Image: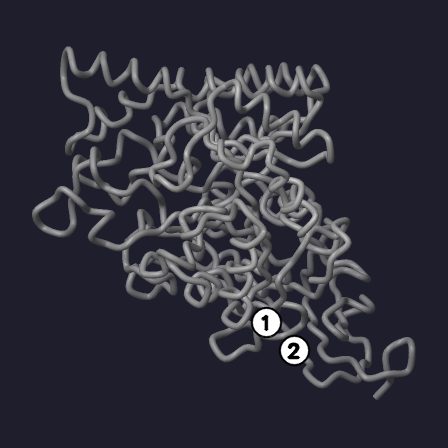
Amino acid sequence: MPLVADGTRADLVVRARRALVDGGWREASVVVRDGRVVSIGDLGDDVSATVDVTLPDEQVLLPGVVDSHVHVNEPGRTEWEGFATATRAAAAGGVTTIVDMPLNSIPPTTTVDALEQKRSAAGPQSVVDVGFWGGAIPANLGTGDLRALHEAGVFGFKAFLSPSGVDEFPHLTTAQLHEAMAELAEFDGLLIVHAEDPDGLDAAAGAASSGAPAGGAAYDAFVRSRPDVVERTAIEHVVDALRATGGRAHVLHLSSATALDTIRAAKAEGLRLTVETCPHYLTFDAEHIGDGATQFKCCPPIRGEANRELLWQALVDGTIDVVASDHSPSTRELKFAGGTDGAHGDFDVAWGGISGLELSFRAVWTGARQRGIALETVVGWMSRGTAALVGLPAKGRIAVGADADLVAFAPETPVTIDVDDLSHRNPVTAYDDARLFGEVAATWVGGRLAGPSAPPARLLVRPDAGVAS
């Protein structure tokens, strides 16, 4: 059998009648050695490889998903989620790279020492590649910690503009937002922002206390407790800070379409602003969430059907740049806190977060398919786009020289979700019993088949950080 171009044997060749190669569909044989794609040829090319795989006609070959918004929670709250279970869930969903949020672990990733604790926990267990966000909190502004974390290779810095829900990760005031962005602008660091305005939240709570109470079991009361204006105002504060500092910012988990005009104007002005939304905002709607269904609780909240359709339109027109899961798991007891039957909770006290890492790509593809949006467009939002956001040019695409992060995917296979079949730690998800399209048949990370027995994957740093992965 002929060898690859330099006369050596390949580790893997994957052959597919439909492979998404550098953004376009073609028949291809994708040849891998030492974790990288070394050549892309015709389907029937004679290649010597240790493993030779031909996909059946119903499967397509895609680049792995890059999920830039994942809460793993280890160390410190590993009973909520950990690197072993989270990365297995990622691989099962076609996700080959995750970037871990700096909370809800203890300690949060706000110092280099805390980052090293994260890396020590992740290294032996992770079966997909893992990078890390740092955190910007009041206590580490102006201390040198942000620059030190940047030099250690974090991909940017998470900040909350309203209470985060955990005491060890306090939010920034508007003045501290400007301070953080100015400090990061000194070394062109990226600030990623949970954008909800605390004054607006307080006002909504005050209005509710004079009438129907916010929270409790009623979903519509929960949505009223976090109205659109709360997101819109916070995003306006981010735009003001960008204008004042010349920095970079990314708005996380956009739920409210009322902020889209602000975002469009900021981009037209040339401000360096990017925006994500999440699969749950594109899949569910407030009209179909029942009282006590706290598996759907997240902040900002899932809003109405008309709002959801505007988010889809903003993705298509490029106002929203990317989609990431915001996988934010907890124990079942926390997720249904305040309830009496273990399956319904109180929106005032239940943990807010959607467990969806394994299902995120399939959920977005299902919604796109229903709207006539092409599969390659979804890949652009969830692979190439997110890879560009975090500065990983070797991820999110199938091309010579790129990382051999590959997914065999059957896009037309229907699947009814059973939470007990999922790989994340605690059996609760908003997607339980949902009917989705798409089956992940195989996931390769660096050319190695991912799974519980796979060797550990890589811990990632920003390529320009000058430190080893």
- Is residue 368 shown above or below 432? above
Instruction: Identify the element where label 2 is drawn.
Output: strand
Q: Which mark is residue 56?
A: 1
- Is residue 420 shown above or below 434? below
Q: How many marks?
A: 2
Image quadrant where residue 426 sits? bottom left
Please, what is the three-letter code of the amino acid marked with disc 2?
Val
Where does the N terminus fall, quadrant-wise? bottom right
* Colour option used: one colour
- Given residues 343 and 332, the one toward you in this image is 332
Q: Can you identify the residue that label 2 sits on?
A: 53
Image quadrant where residue 290 sits? top left
Residue drawn at point x = 47 percent, y = 64 percent: 92
Category of crowding for the residue at label 1, using alpha-carbon neighbours closer than 10 angstroms: few (below 14), some (14–19), many (at least 20) = few
Category of crowding for the residue at label 2, using alpha-carbon neighbours closer than 10 angstroms: few (below 14), some (14–19), many (at least 20) = few
Q: Nearer the viewer, mark 1 or mark 2?
A: 2
